Image: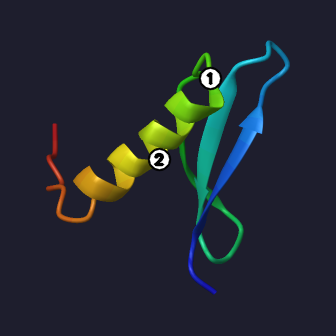
Amino acid sequence: MAGKFELYTDKGGHWRFNLEASNGQVIASSEGYNSKDAAKNGIESVRKNAPDAPVVEL
């Protein structure tokens, strides 16, 4: 099974998402969004921008 995005509302009523690996481990968490559509846009941004993102050591 591939990883998945989980979309949910937090206790404060904000929309958030987690990126979960195939083993169930959360590997990324989002900020809080005011709407479900905004959170979905955040997911699409991760999908679009992260595949070839470089690793930068600080």
Residue 53, quarter of the rendered image: bottom left
- Residue 42 at x, y percent in the picture: 44, 38
- Residue 22 at x, y percent in the picture: 63, 77
Q: Quadrant of the C terminus?
A: top left
- Residue 24 at x, y percent in the picture: 71, 68
Q: Residues within 10 Å of mark 1 (few under 14, many from 20)?
A: some
Q: Secondary structure at mark 1?
A: loop
Residue 2, quarter of the rendered image: bottom right
Whole-angstrom CA distance, mark 1 to mark 2, is 13 Å
Name the front one of labels 1 and 2: 1
**Colour scheme employed for the rendering of this structure:** rainbow
Residue 16, quarter of the rendered image: top right
Q: Which residue type does callout 1 highlight?
A: Ser
Mark drawn on residue 43: 2
User: Is residue 30 something one can see in this rendering?
Assistant: no
Mark drawn on residue 16: none
Q: Which residue is mark 1?
A: 35
Q: Which residue type does callout 2 highlight?
A: Ile
Check the image and report above or below for 35 versus 19.
Answer: above
Q: Secondary structure at mark 2?
A: helix
User: Is residue 25 something one can see in this rendering?
Assistant: yes
